[in-house]
Amino acid sequence: MKKISSILVIIGIALILIYSCSDENNNNDAGYYGTPELQKTEYLGCFLKNKEKGDDMPKDTIYYELLNGTLVLNLSVVRNCAACLTDSTVIDNDSVNIFISDDCPPIANCICEYDYKYYFTEFGENVHFKVFIRSEDETEYSLWDELTYP
């Protein structure tokens, strides 16, 4: 009888150890806060010289979507058709700051939507996005918009 109870105690301890180890490595737990990793950025709209004229006035937009486990941040930035936009991304824990700079004067007599798609993996429960824009005649970036996932 002592052998059986000793074996049961050993099996119980082994199961507890196995469960605790697998629980520590499970990044899908509700308390997991991952640092997002930028996988790629797509530049669409006017970046592709797509200057379609629709009936609707273009407008700035920001939203996210989930595609097969990838968090996609979508930005549509309305600027002059001759804009020279560059972007950079700074990631700190669960915060993603995107900096967009327009280094050309507004020389064209039209406006256009410049579309960005930022693809992130390894993100946690929350991701805080802030987008900052600086025009050619400005020395500082200003907050354009912000959004939190979810």
Image (cartoon, rainbow, N blue to C red):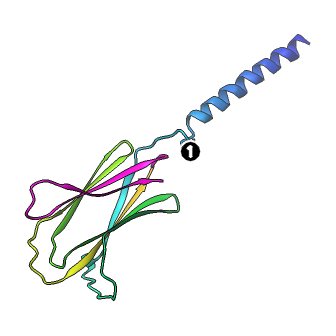
Q: Position of residue 123 (x, y in %)?
A: 45, 49
- Is 70 a magenta residue? no
Q: Is residue 101 above or below residue 50?
A: above
Q: How many marks?
A: 1
Q: Position of residue 50 (x, y in %)?
A: 28, 83
Which residue is depicted at the point 35% across and 46% down?
95
- Is 128 a magenta residue? yes
Q: Which residue has dot 1 on it?
A: 28
User: Where the N terminus falls, by quadrant?
Assistant: top right
- In the picture provided, is 36 more to the left or to the right than 76? right
Which residue is depicted at the point 61% across and 35% down?
23
Which residue is depicted at the point 41% across and 56% down?
120
Q: Position of residue 37 (x, y in %)?
A: 38, 51
- In the picture provided, is 106 more to the left or to the right than 17? left
Furthest residue in direction top, as rendered: 2
**Residue 114 sits in which quadrant?**
bottom left
SS category of the residue bearing label 1: loop
Residue toward you, 8 or 38: 38
**Residue 89 sits in which quadrant?**
bottom left
- Going by the numbered disc 1, the residue's amino acid type is Asn
**Residue 85 sits in which quadrant?**
bottom left
**Which range is magenta?**
123-150
Mark 1 neighbour density, 10 Å: few (under 14) some (14–19) many (20 or more) = few
Q: Is residue 122 above or below residue 69?
A: above
Q: Position of residue 55 (x, y in %)?
A: 33, 88
Residue toward you, 50 or 141: 141
